[in-house]
Image: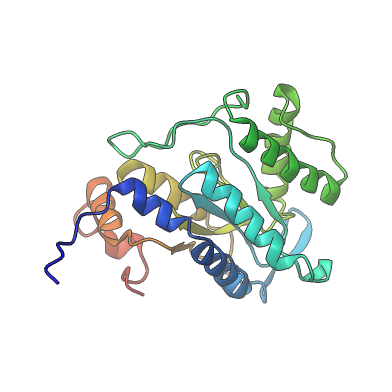
Amino acid sequence: AGIQDKQVPAIDTERALLAPARISQIAGYIREHFDQKTKRASTYRHDGQRLAGFNSLFACASIEAAKRYYTAFSTQQKDLPEAQRLKVGLIYSFAANEEEDDGLLGEEDFETDGLDQGSRDFLDAAIQDYNALFGTSFDTSADKFQNYYKDLSQRLKKRELDIVIVVNMFLTGFDATTLNTLWVDKNLKSHGLIQAYSRTNRILNSVKTYGNIVSFRNLEQATNDALALFGNQDAKGIVLLKPYTE
C-alpha cells in the first residue's frame, strides 16, 4: 500500500519493552530456568554453612521496569507454597536512567527524596515484604534505607535471597562469591557492561568456576566491543567460555 516504515524513536522502544506480556514472559523464563542457571542441584560449604547453588541480580533499564518485574514475580508466585517461591528483593534510589557516554553506570546514592511518590510508595511496599520475610523493620526514610541497603547486601552474600532486582545499585563494586548469575534487561556498553558482568565472576570453588550472563536484549556487539576495548583483541576467547550466540 506504499506505506513507508518509520524509525520508531527510542522512547517507544523502551515502552514496547515494558509491555505486560513481555515482562510476564521474562519473569516466567527466569523462574523456570532459575535452578539450572544457579546450580541449585550442587551443594558446597561457605562460611561454615552447606548451601545449594547460588543467587542472582536482575538489572533493569529503569525504575518503572524494576517495579513491573517485582509485581510480575509476586503475581506469578502468590499461590505457590512458600518453600517453592523465589525470594525476590528490590532496591533503587533516585538516579538518572541515562548512562554516561562511556557507558559508565551512574552511582546511585541513598537519596530516596528525589523519587516520585508512586515509586517511593512502591519501594516502601517491597521493603515491607522484605521485613515480613526476615523480621526486620526498614523503610525508605534516610537512615533506615541505608540500613536496608546494608542488610540486603549481607543477605545477598549469605545467599538468603534468590534474586535482587536493581536499576544501577549493586552493579558497580559489589562482590559476593555466592552470586553466579546476572539477568539483564538493560542496554549496557563499554565500561558499565564490564562492571555489571563482573559482578558474577568471583570464583568460589569447583562448583562455581564462572558466572552466567542471561540477557534479554541483544548485547552481542556491545559485549564484543567492550571486551576488545578493555582486553586485547583476542580477549573474548579468554573472558567468555562460549560464543555469545550460545
Residue 231 at what x, y percent from top left?
26, 50
Residue 242, picture quadrant: bottom left
In the image shown, does 121 or 54 lie closer to the viewer? 121
Q: In this picture, is 196 found above or below 51?
A: above
- Relative to 179, is 209 above or below? below
| Furthest residue toward front | 1
In x, y percent, where is residue 131? 82, 44
Colour scheme in the image? rainbow
Q: Name the spot of residue 140 as percent of width and height, x first.
A: 71, 30
Q: Residue at x 67, y 42 (%)?
A: 153
For the point 35% across and 46% down, which residue is it?
Answer: 11
Instruction: Answer above or below: position of 186 versus 244.
Output: above
Viewed as shown, does residue 116 lie left or right of 246? right
Q: Is residue 172 visible?
A: yes
Nearer to the camera, 221 or 140: 140
Q: Residue furthest right?
A: 135
- As drawn, is 44 to the left or to the right of 100? right
| Residue at (46% x, 56% y) in the render | 184
Q: Quadrant of the C terminus?
A: bottom left
Where is 31 relative to 138, above or below?
below
Q: Nearer the viewer, residue 79 or 131?
A: 79
Give residue 17's quadrant in the image: bottom left
Report whether residue 188 is seen.
Answer: no
Residue occupying the far left of the picture: 2
Residue 84 location in percent, x, y? 77, 71
Q: The N terminus lies in which quarter of the figure?
A: bottom left
Task: Residue at 72% x, 51% y: name it.
Answer: 158
- Callout count: 0
